[in-house]
Image (cartoon, helix red, strand yellow):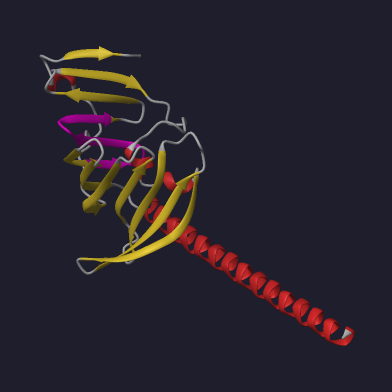
Amino acid sequence: MKVKIQEINNNSITNMTKKCFQLAVILLLSFTSIQAQDKKAKDLLNEVTSKIKSYDNIVIDFKYSLNNAKENINQDSKGNVTMKGNQYVLNFMGVTKIFDGQKTYTIVPEDEEVTISKVNEKDDNAITPSKMLTFFNSGYKYTIDIVQNVKGRKIQYIKLVPTSGKDQRKEILLGIDSQTKHIYNLIETGKNGTKTTLTVNSFKTNQPLSKNQFTFVASKYPKYYINKLD
């Protein structure tokens, strides 16, 4: 009888050991898989950053959508931006913003007003179009997500989750064209359920630009009120 009990105990211990070993292997494989996914995501983001920095200038036409089913909000807008280094000209929702490297000129035709302000480009919280193309380099955890075929283009998505608990964004899906390494779209989901989507309709590089492309010319706005904040 004692032998049988001993055999039962030994079998139980053996089975438990096997289960623990199997669980450990599964956890190890899962961790390795996550690490591999993270590395793949990081490598792809690094490729995107290198590609962006290699261009003399970038001209983008985009569509911007804002949706919140709970609040019954559905808005679509189009815009375009021309960038060279940290300089840019942004046209969006009837407003033009020019940044010449030192000051931002916000031109609002509806109000016939131009607001001039200084921007500290070293400020991490300062949002500029150029930063929008490389914002993912800090402040996020990222993993490889789904792949979608969009009109014959292979779009690889990367999920980015803000590391700051104060961030009002739940997650961001960044769609990257696997062939060109250009950003195709950005889908941002807020903690309040609001979803915003920015889709790149046209991505042109190294375009011929005028010398005054990023220069504000006051004579073009003779009747406008000039509001100097700094």
Q: Name the residue rendered at 39%, 39% in the picture.
A: 191
Question: Does 14 sit above or below residue 207?
Answer: below
* Residue extending farthest front: 1
Q: Nearer the viewer, residue 218 or 30?
A: 30
Image position, residue 91 (x, y; %)? 19, 35
Q: What's the residue at 24%, 30% (across, down)?
A: 97
Q: Nearer the viewer, residue 148 or 47?
A: 148
User: Going by the image, does 159 lie left or right of 227?
Assistant: right
The kind of secondary structure the magenta stretch mainly shows is strand
**Is the residue 200 above or below the residue 10 in the image?**
above
Q: Quadrant of the C terminus?
A: top left
Residue 69, percent from left and from top = 24, 42
Locate the N terminus by quadrant. Answer: bottom right
Q: Quadrant of residue 83?
A: top left
Q: Is residue 185 above or below residue 79?
A: below
Instruction: Indicate yes or no whether the magenta region holds residue 14.
Output: no
Judging depth in this view, the residue of 174 and 95 nearest the camera is 174
The residues colored magenta run 81-98
Is residue 83 found inside the magenta-colored segment of the image? Answer: yes
Q: Residue at x 18, y 29 (%)?
A: 95
Residue appearing at x 21%, y 19% in the figure: 114
Q: How many marks?
A: 0
The residue closer to the viewer here, 139 or 1, is 1
Percent position (x, y) of residue 80?
20, 42
